[in-house]
Amino acid sequence: MAPPPSSAHDSSITLDVNGDKHTLTVDHRTTLLDALRERLDLTGTKKGCDQGQCGACTVLLDGRRTVACLQLAVAAEGRAVTTVEGLAEGGQLHPVQQAFLDLDGYQCGYCTPGQICSAVAVIEEHAAGWPSAVTDDVRPEAGPPPLTDDEIRERMSGNLCRCSAYVSIVQAVSRAAAAARAESAGTTAAGAGEAA
Amino acid sequence: MKEFGYQRASDVSGALALLGADAGARFLGGGTNLVDLMKAGVERPSRLVDVRGLPLDRIEPTADGGLRIGATVTNSDLAAHPGVRSRYPALAQAVLAGASGQLRNMATVGGNLLQRTRCGYFTDVSRPCNKRVPGSGCPAVEGEHRNHAILGASAHCVAVHPSDMAVALTAFDAVVSYRTGDGPGELPLADLYLPVDGTPHRETALPQGALITAVTLPPAPVAALSRYRKVRERASYAFAIGSVAAALDVRDGVIREARLAFGAVASRPWRARAAERTLTGAPAGGETFAAAADAELAAARPLPHNAYKVTLMRNLVVAVLTGLTEEAAR
Amino acid sequence: MTTAPAARESAVGTARTRVEGRDKVTGAARYAAEIPFAGLAHGWLVLSTVARGRITSLETAGVLAMPGVLTVLHHGNAPRLNADYIGLLGVPPDPTCVVFQHDRVPFMGWPVALVVAETPEQAREAAEALVVRYEEEPHDTAFTRDRPDAYPVGGRMPAETRKGDMEAALAASAVVVDAEYTTPEEYHHPMEPHAATARWDGGRLDVVDSNQGATWIVGELANLFSLDPASVRVRSEHVGGGFGSKGIRAHQVAAVMAATHLRRPVRVVLTRRQMFPLAGHRSATIQRIRLGADTGGRLRALEHRSLSHTSTVHEFVEPSTGATRVMYDADAHHTANLVVRLDLPTPTWMRAPGEAPGSFALETALDELAEKCGIDPIELRVRNEPERGPVSGLPFSSRNLIACFQEGARRFGWADRDPRPGLRREGRWLLGTGTAAASFPVMALPSTAAVTAEADGTFTVRIAAADIGTGARTALTQVAADALEVAPDRVRMRIGDSDFGPAMIAGGSMGTRSWSWAITTAAGELRERLVPGAGIPPEGITVRSDTTEAVGALAQMERHSFGAQFAEVAVDVTTGEVRVRRMLGVFAAGRIINPLTARGQFTGGMIWGISMALHEEAVRDSVSGGHYGADLAGYHVATHADVPHVEAHWIDDPDPHDPVGIKGIGEIGIVGAAAAVANAVRHATGVRHRSLPIRPDRVILAGTAGAGADAGAGAGARAAGEAHA
């Protein structure tokens, strides 16, 4: 068949990133990662391997962690993208960011945005009751697994850290998860109090 | 990566029509494999038809007590599904053993089944590969093949299928539903993948232009006691060098029913039917398990650097079946 | 504003979060490929697909017609470069980075062209479309122990050292260990790929780069392009890891070439796959060790020979026997570093070059000797503590190795260990523990720094230091604060800019030491210049320092850090899985500036040791001579799940001749770590693994002590070794 016109190779799209709408024309080859970094100047999302093998480009897509390097930008239209730049609120660091900072959960910092975005999702996935590869009994009747260090390690394994700050990253995720659980319990208790 | 068109399908017939309009078009699901291969130059589609938004993202019980899993259900949703975890735990374990949390959120069930081998010659366009360029040769036979096939391979290709999910699905007799312009069709997963023989580039029995719409798990009470074990060269985020999906129904020390499938040993998830025959009706125990493994692995034809896989698989079978037997006794 | 210091606590020695921490956790920290420039063009390297030969043609016409393509640079049109110089680190440039000068291809992945286009997508597709034809020649990539063309290479140390009569000493020894150890090609793979953006700005070449030393890169680029160094500026504010790989590389040179040719900014980023041939690596090693001892384990003979490979175009030696010249003495003591030139990419420094693979061999051999003698491995080391440098005869500035072992043994619970292998089992897992010693040289090189007292009472330090993740920016802030006798929050630390004056690189575990020396010197002088009560002019008061003289005046001594590594592993010999359960290291590594970040340096190194012991290995396809599986799915580094709780501790060990007491901590963590893991695997299974990594297939084939022989080339090596001798 005849080659399609060149306009068939790019599209005008609107990306929803950290709550802001950006309209841009993208070459269909452009990944979400390159759109963020090269077009929207949101360079917090890192390019480590560009092959889905390191996790440095982890962002949240409709609330779920995703590697932006294997996500075509054109296919991300209509979905909510949250990058590391969108985690802090009004200058207040996200608890996961604060834990990484306090516990030195990084060294060179290049995998850090991906680790942090991943950790935010890990805490939510665990709270939702998702099992992992190290959960001995995945049946729902076994109840949700406690978020042990081994559970954190397995769930965070899609994020390589060549500096190997793994020990302090696990500590940071553990601390942020405990804080999230405490807050959630507090909310529940408060809610119960109101109901009573 | 060459330029390509992109279209988003909103329904199955629309997707089929879009694909049919361009001989170089490919369906795009989660993209975790296809986009990677496009970057590597292995895949060079002229058009992508995005099927991720199709209404095929539900897991529903079937009338006979099985589960019907939509093709665009993500790996994550499959592994988190209470029905899967409760009734086919090995399937949830297999999915969770694959890739990373990020990739499981993206990858779809249909795409998982159709993912390509991770053989390093296949993914390196500067090297020959019969699967990528038919007739160009298979460097793995003489070269690097530590993680290549020991079962069902040919001199033309010794690559292995990388999926964990498909191994468990195979053990549970999953059936693949698809649609073409001519209407719907079904294939047992065991028949989806073609034998390697002299045509390693022909990977599946799906008709040209077919779209996988669902995978159906028939009811399998035996699957309630099942386990997926995966061995790899690091503890996580790596492809298997050998894996086993197994289910056992043991009563009074006798195996009433057994399901066994191997991963990372062949061009397809490998249903171990010879082993299952040995197991059925035999007393549950190490000797039976070893004999079953040996019955299956008698057909193994290892290469110089992957003979360890025969030992590995034998040991894995014994270990997993022993574990299931102990679990059954609890 | 006065600068009179109030009574204050020392900043050095207290845990402080990173100065740039907030930028790193919010994504605000920008790395080399992340600084926007108007009119930026993107370059994509094209690498050879043959391992040896000659380029016969490059079909550029079609590529130049592709959308967005601006130029294709190659040996037929590239400007000539000057490669006839010796760089900051005392070596000529690796021709791999002297790009596009001739048609020869010396290895698979040699840079043959740069395609520049308006967008990265266009550049990538055009680079992939470029047809390059070669006249291919047979390649030789076979790295084997019996290469007749191997030859001794010195480099930073003598190629060989020899004292005593080796054969006589071995013959007179009651106990002899003779074994071969091998380590594979290993790759740094910092998470940030190598990236550089070059542009001409008002007559100056401005390069935003990811490197381990801006001064270093300025010197290389100025030499290569025959420019006045003052007309070159290199900036690298944040660097996403280096580990030895981030020096001068093909991408910077190609970017400068293209920016010069196109008169617009050009960025070149290496892909992860391109990093394999272009970013350097640690050569594979084949090491033979012969130990002779009396029944009490006292060494009479120690021979360590190491063979590594380099490219045909550049000489680089992995000096694996260096630490052996420091660790243990014997009447007959012989060490040699040999190299063979193959059609392979050029290796380079990689975290603890020499010490990392060398300590695997040496510290495993010591474990073998301890076992043969029936002596506890720690006691064996106690009995072999040298008084002076075994080869140099020089005194040690300090040597706290045994103190590290004692503290480590106490914390690890070593005393409870039953030395017999294969006894501890937990389900399917066999458990074992192992230990090993570590050492790394203490060095310093000249640096300059500028410290400014600002009119507002704060201080600004400018130094061309690089923080590649070591925490240098924070540590230097603490050092400066103490030297200025102010709180750290009054010190602004500016690094990563060659315009701040010459400074040492982040490498050799001597960055923070060398930079601190310069900062302390300048700060001390500035403090003397500041008159209490007197005002400071608006431009501030600046003092510059240069430590060339002071560093040069250091007396010749054996200066080293030391450490003791402990590991506990679980091994399933039926599946070949090895898991490290815990790891503990105790180090005597000088004064610790920042315990929070220092712990990460030690544990990071130890985890590199786990990764080296169990995972890391680049696989080479013998048929093509290229890599197989050249990506992070094929080259395994440890993931979160591979890393248990890892503890690092240190003992008080300030360097007596350093102004701050620093020794350097970036590399010692990896030294001995792989040996500790391998020794633990031996204890768990009874099988001695002498080839890294200890992969599942190797464990499965080796089985347990009762089932089979030792793994690795040990036995065969002895036969081959005898043939050599």
Image (cartoon, coloured by chain):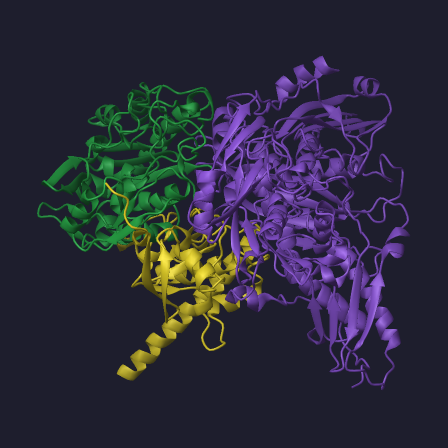
Chain colours: A yellow, B green, C purple
Quarter holding the N terminus of chain B is: top left
| Vertical arrangement, residue C133 with respect to residue C93, above or below | above
* Pick the front one: C491 or C622: C622
Q: Position of residue C678 (x, y in %)?
A: 60, 35
Q: Position of residue C272 (x, y in %)?
A: 51, 44
Q: Is residue B158 visible?
A: yes
Quarter holding the C terminus of chain B is: top left
* Pick the front one: B44 or B265: B44
Q: Is residue C705 visible?
A: no
Q: Position of residue C193 (x, y in %)?
A: 55, 49
Q: Which residue is drawn at 39% across and 20% down?
A: B302
Q: Where is residue C557 in the image (x, y as percent from the top left)?
A: 87, 45
Q: Is residue A24 left or right of residue C112?
A: left
Q: Is residue C39 left or right of residue A35?
A: right
* Pick the front one: B110 or C716: B110
Q: In which quarter of the image is residue C649?
A: bottom right
Instruction: Specify the farthest residue to the top.
Output: C723
Q: In this view, does B307 lie to the left or right of C516?
A: left
Q: Residue at x 55, y 53 (%)?
A: C267
| Vertical arrangement, residue B275 with respect to residue B246, above or below | above
